[in-house]
Image (tube, rainbow, N blue to C red):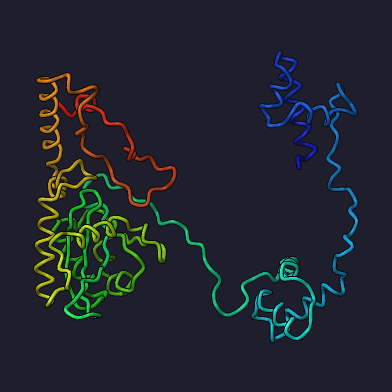
Amino acid sequence: MISTPDRRNAVALIDEAVNSGARRPKACAELGISDRTYRRWTAPGEGTGEVTADQRPFVERPTPANALSDEERQAVLDVCNEPEFASLPPSQIVPRLADRGVYLASEATVYRLLRAAGQAEHRGRAKAPVRRAKPTGHKATGPCQVWTWDISWLPGPIRGLFFHLYLIVDIYSRKIVGWEVHESETAEHAAALVRRAVLAEGCMTSPLVLHADNGSPMKGATMTATLEALGILASFSRPRVSNDNPFSEALFRTCKYRPEWPRNGFETIDAARAWVRAFVAWYNTEHRHSALRFVTPAARHQGEEVEILRARGRVYEAARAANPTRWSGPTRCWAPKGPVWLNPDKDATVTEPANAPETPMAAVGGLP
C-alpha cells in the first residue's frame, strides 16, 4: 500500500511532467503506476491537487466463522507451554494430542498462535540453524599474497588406514608452496608446514592471507599462535561448504586422478611421500595449467609467463601471416592472466570473466 504523502508526491511529479508537455500515461509509467491509478487517486478533487487516502487499513473486516475464540487460543498456548510439550514443536505436539483423543487446532494454527505470542523460537536444547555470512573475498595480484591449504586422505595398505596429505597452494600462480605427509592430523604438523613454506618462499615481511576450512588442525592453538607470530591473516570457510576453498579442492582432484595414482593404496608412509614429491615436481614445473593460459605454476610464480606467452603470440601471428586464409578472425589470445580472486564479493570487479572473447596479443600489448 502506498501512503498518502507518497501519493501526493507522485501526483505532483506527474502533474509537473504533464505541464511540461509530457503525456500523462508515460509519466505514470516512469513512477511504476498506471494512468487509471492516477485517475483513481485524484478523482474526488481532479485539478485541485487533492489526493484520496488509502481506506483499506480502516475497513472493518468480519471475524471468520471458523476462527478460534480467545479462550480457545489461550488453551492452545497453555498446552504448548506445559512441561511435557515445552521443548516440542507443533509438528510433535498435535499428533501426541491426537493419540489421546484431543484436538485443539491444526499444526499451522498452532505455529501461527505461537508466532503471534512471540514464542515461535527453536524449542529444545539444540541450537537453531545459523546462517553464516560468506567469507571475505581476497584478491591476489602477485605470488605470496593469498595461499589456501587443506588436508586430504591418502589410502594406506589396508582398508581403513590412511595417511594425511597437507598441501599449501598459492592461488595466484597455483604453485604448491608447501606439502607434507603424516600419519595424523594435528595443528602442530600444520604450523610446522606453514613456517617452512614461509621461509622457503621468503615472504616473512610481506602481508599474506592463509585460507583454510574449519577443521581442528586449522584452528588449533598452535596453528593460531604460529600465524600470529608470522603476521599471517587467517581466513576460514563456512562449515561444510567446500566451495569456499575451491583451489585446494581442485588441486586434490588433480592429484588423485593422475594415471600413476596407486589404486591399491600406498604400502608405507615413505612410499606416499615419494609419490607426492614426484607429483609436486611435475605439477609445479611440467603441468601446463589451463587457468594460466597453459603455463606452468612455477613459470607464473617466477614471473616468466609474460615472455612465454609473448613468444607464443609471435608464433601465432607468424603462422597467420604465412597463411592468412586459415584465420577468419584474430589469433588465439595469449595475454597473461590478471589478478585472481578467492571468494569474490558480488560487486568485486573480475578482470576477465570465464566467457570473455579472445583478443589478439597486439591489442593488449602482448606483442612488441
Q: How many marks?
A: 0
Q: Outermost residue toward the top?
A: 21
Residue at 19%, 78% in the rendered image: 183
Could you tell me residue 53's position as x and y percent? 85, 38
Q: Is residue 143 above or below residue 89?
A: above
Quadrant of the image containing the C terminus = top left
Position of 359 with respect to 305 (left or right) is: right
Could you tell me residue 174's position as x and y percent? 21, 52
Q: Quadrant of residue 27?
A: top right
The residue closer to the viewer here, 5 or 339, is: 339
Q: Is residue 194 above or below residue 188?
A: above
Residue at 70%, 16% in the rendered image: 22
Q: Quadrant of residue 314?
A: top left
Could you tell me residue 47's position as x and y percent? 86, 21
Residue at 12%, 33% in the rendered image: 312
Residue at 14%, 61% in the rendered image: 199
